[in-house]
Image (tube, rainbow, N blue to C red):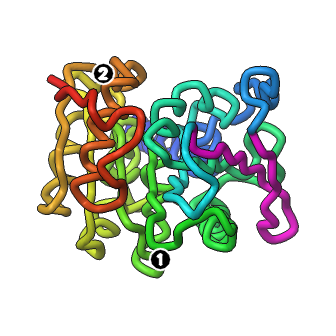
């Protein structure tokens, strides 16, 4: 019996050590993602830029608002999920741009054409460079910078808090902390190398927050959205009947809802292509 226990314990220690070393391959599955490049035929206005993050170059795409003047305007710094690259996002962001908001799509180190390796430290450094780049543009209204993160991207944008203060934060299908998922793999939470503690980050911010979460989300359970809302009691919490990868189910309706949120908090004026067509999302 003792030999069996020792064998099981030794096997677990080997497993735990191996997973500890390889966990970033699970958290950031970048090697399995295809990056086809900018679709300049569909988005000729897309601007490709490169951020310097340490010794590495990390890609950023900027897409200006649709149908607005060229003066200073709000800009959303956007971080995608861990199983995406920026190449998959421009089309779904058209509705946001129609509101009069420019978008800065930030890639993660090691993803797509970007150099480096993803981790909490390197992702945070990338987001700081993206923030500095956005604030330095003549077209940016520095008082109307929005942080928008989906899933893993929620942790990426919230890593900017509390040293950087956005005009608003938008979180989509975002988790409380990566430590919550450790037991799924039979590991204690302290072994997580990149915790991304979003609950703690939100507690440091008292500005406008919009949280969206699917009630059928099995990847990041709905309870994570509830706990994030509890960490930011001022947040608007949009509950949708969807899972993780299909949330929101209708992007046009979602941008209309966000447009109302931005107008309520003075980030947008009562204008824009969606100003008179808002319908609530059920």
Residue occupying the point 44% across, 50% down: 148
- Highlighted range, magenta: 46-66
| Location of mark 2 (residue) | 243
Relative side of 218 to 280, left or right: right
Mark 2 element type: loop
Does the CB distance between marks 2 and 1 fall below 8 Å? no
56 in magenta: yes
Q: Looking at the image, is mark 2 or mark 1 nearer the viewer?
A: 1
Question: Residue 164's mark?
Answer: 1
Residue in front for this viewpoint, 195 or 241: 241
Mark 1 element type: loop
Q: CA distance from mark 2 to mark 1?
A: 31 Å
User: Residue 199 falls in which quadrant of the image?
Assistant: bottom left
Q: Earlier in the sequence, mark 2 or mark 1?
A: 1
Residue in front for this viewpoint, 14 or 172: 172
Does residue 27 appear in this view? no
Classed neighbour count for the residue bearing mark 1: other residues with Cα under 10 Å, few (<14), some (14–19), many (≥20): few
Relative side of 205 to 46, left or right: left
Residue in front for this viewpoint, 258 or 126: 258
Classed neighbour count for the residue bearing mark 2: other residues with Cα under 10 Å, few (<14), some (14–19), many (≥20): many
User: Residue 135 falls in which quadrant of the image?
Assistant: bottom right
Q: Quadrant of the N terminus?
A: top left
Residue occupying the point 55% across, 45% down: 68
Does residue 221 appear in this view? yes
Q: Position of residue 16 (x, y in %)?
A: 51, 46
Q: Position of residue 125 (x, y in %)?
A: 65, 68
């Amino acid at each position: 019996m003792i030999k069996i226990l020792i064998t099981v314990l030794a096997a677990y220690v080997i497993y735990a050590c191996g997973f500890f070393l390889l966990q970033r391959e699970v958290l950031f599955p970048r090697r399995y993602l295809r990056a086809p490049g900018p679709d300049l035929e569909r988005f000729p206005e897309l601007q490709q830029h490169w951020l310097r993050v340490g010794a590495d170059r990390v890609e950023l795409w900027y897409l200006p608002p649709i149908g607005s003047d060229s003066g200073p305007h709000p800009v959303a710094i956007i971080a995608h999920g861990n199983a995406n690259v920026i190449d998959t996002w421009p089309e779904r962001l058209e509705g946001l741009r129609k509101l009069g908001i420019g978008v800065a799509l930030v890639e993660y180190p090691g993803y797509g054409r970007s150099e480096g390796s993803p981790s909490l430290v390197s992702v945070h450094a990338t987001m700081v460079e993206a923030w500095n780049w956005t604030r330095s543009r003549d077209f940016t209204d520095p008082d109307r910078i929005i942080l928008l993160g989906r899933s893993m991207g929620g942790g990426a944008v919230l890593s900017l808090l509390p040293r950087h203060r956005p005009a608003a934060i938008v979180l989509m299908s975002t988790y409380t902390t990566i430590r919550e998922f450790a037991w799924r793999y039979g590991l204690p939470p302290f072994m997580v190398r990149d915790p991304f503690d979003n609950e703690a980050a939100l507690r440091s911010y008292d500005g406008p927050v919009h949280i969206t979460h699917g009630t059928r989300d099995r990847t990041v359970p709905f309870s994570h959205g509830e706990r994030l809302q509890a960490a930011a009691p001022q947040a608007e919490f949009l509950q949708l009947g969807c899972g993780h990868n299909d949330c929101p189910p209708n992007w046009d309706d979602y941008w209309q809802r966000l447009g109302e949120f931005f107008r309520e908090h003075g980030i947008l004026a009562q204008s824009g292509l969606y100003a008179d067509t808002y319908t609530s999302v059920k």
